[in-house]
Structures are given as structure tokens and as C-alpha cells.
Amino acid sequence: MIDPSLFQLVCFYAFAAVTVVAALSVITLRNSVHAVLALVLTFFSTACIWMLAEAEFLAIALIVVYVGAVMVLFLFVVMMLDIDQEKIREGFVKFLPVGLIVAVVMLVEMLGLIGVRMMHTQTMGENPATAAGMSNTQWLGMALYTQYLLPFEIAALILTVGVIAAVALTLRHRAGTRKQHPSEQVAVKATDRVRIIKMAAERPADSQPAPAQESKP
């Protein structure tokens, strides 16, 4: 019989390895479509790790929002665009040393931050969802809509304002483009668009002349 904790540890390392390899493939693959598919695999593997950590809501949100919507849109845009691969490779090779230096500095800073936090860490208590006898998604919903209802509504309001501002900034009047005016379309009447005319019926004349009849002497 396999120990559940050992099996969970093996799955964690397997998903983590797939995530790291897929993330490296995103920046190393030369084909843009393949890079997007590797990013989809990265998100899916990360969602599996979150499932192991009993964060079901985050895992489902990552798959539904990013893998199911955002990445499909990215893949559609990449496949529709005519990308010059040669120019991309030239720019990648040109800025590769600078990118490596920045990546190393960020890695050192993150490791130092993790080390400082580990030195001052405190023992965390039991999982609140488990203590309450609920699933992670149910406990998160109860917390958001009861204890943290006001911050949740403020965040929703800020996102709504951001969407409206983005639409207002991109709404530009350009010459030579066709636009719809819903108010004018709703106020239109049938008498303004259709005019009925009564006229006598006409029969089109024959295009070919009638053959001449021969006269008898």
C-alpha cells in the first residue's frame, strides 16, 4: 500500500518539474505557437500544484480564466499574425546578455527574501477551511461575502472603473470609418426608410423585331 503523503510528494515533484520545463520552453522555443502551447502546459501544471495545496478555487480559476480564455485568445492572435521569426531571433540574441544579468539579479534577490522570511517565520496554524469543516472554495466564498465584503466590493468597483476608462480612452473618432448610432437606429420609422409608389404595369418590348411577312404577287 502506497503512503498517501509519499504519493502526494511524488506528484508535487512531478508537477513542479513539468512546470519548470514548460516555463523554460516558453522562452526558448522558436515557434510562437509552440511557445503559447508550452505556456498553457505551465498554467495547467501550476493548477495541479495548487490542487495538491488544497487551493481548489485558485486552481479552477487559473484553468478557466487563463487556460480557457486568455491563452486561447493569445493562441488565436499569434496564429493570425504574420510574425517575422528572423527579426525576433536577432533581437533575442542581441539582448540575451542583459536579460541573463537581470534574471540572475532577480533570482538572488528572491532567494535572499525567502531566506529572511524563513528566519523570521512563525508556525502557521491549522488550515481554516479544514478547521471549519468546509472545502477551500466554500470557505473562501463565505469569507469574501461576509467578513471581507466591503474590500471585495471596492475591488470590483475599481475593476469596473478601469474597464470603463479603457473603453473611453480607446474611443476615438477617426475619419473614413463607419459607425453605428443606436439612438438613431431606434428612433427610425418605416415611413422614413420605405417609400411605396403606385404606377401602371408595363410590359417590356420584345428585343428582337418580328420577321417581315413576304407579300404574294
Image (cartoon, rainbow, N blue to C red):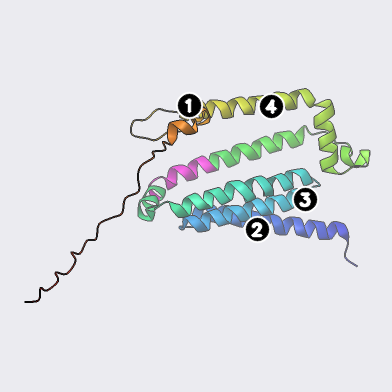
Look at the image and tell me in which quarter the C terminus lies. bottom left
Q: Measure the alpha-carbon separation of dots 2 and 1.
A: 41 Å
Residue found 73% across the figure and 47% down from its top: 60
Q: Which residue is mark 3?
A: 51
Q: CA distance from mark 4 to mark 1?
A: 21 Å
Query: Residue at the spot x=64%, y=54% of the render?
Result: 19
Give the spatial CA distance, label 4 vs label 2.
34 Å
Pick whichever of labels 3 and 4 is earlier in the sequence. 3
Task: Look at mark 2 in the image and give the residue it sits on.
Answer: 18
- Which kind of residue does numbered mark 1 sit on? Leu
Q: Are marks 4 and 2 in contact (CB under 8 Å)?
A: no
Is the residue 104 above or below the residue 78 in the image?
above
Query: Does label 2 or label 3 sit earlier along the sequence?
Result: 2
The quadrant holding residue 204 is bottom left
**Disc 2 packing (10 Å; few <14; some 14–19; many ≥20):** some
Q: Which residues are magenta?
A: 93-103
Residue 49 image offset from top left, x and y in percent: 73, 51
Q: Nearer the viewer, mark 4 or mark 1?
A: 1
> Please, what is the three-letter code of the amino acid marked with disc 2?
Val
Question: On the image, numbered disc 1 is attached to which residue?
Answer: 169
Q: Residue furthest front?
A: 217
**Considering only vertical position in the picture, is 47 above or below 134?**
below
What residue does disc 4 label?
Answer: 155
Q: Residue at x 84, y 27 (%)?
A: 146
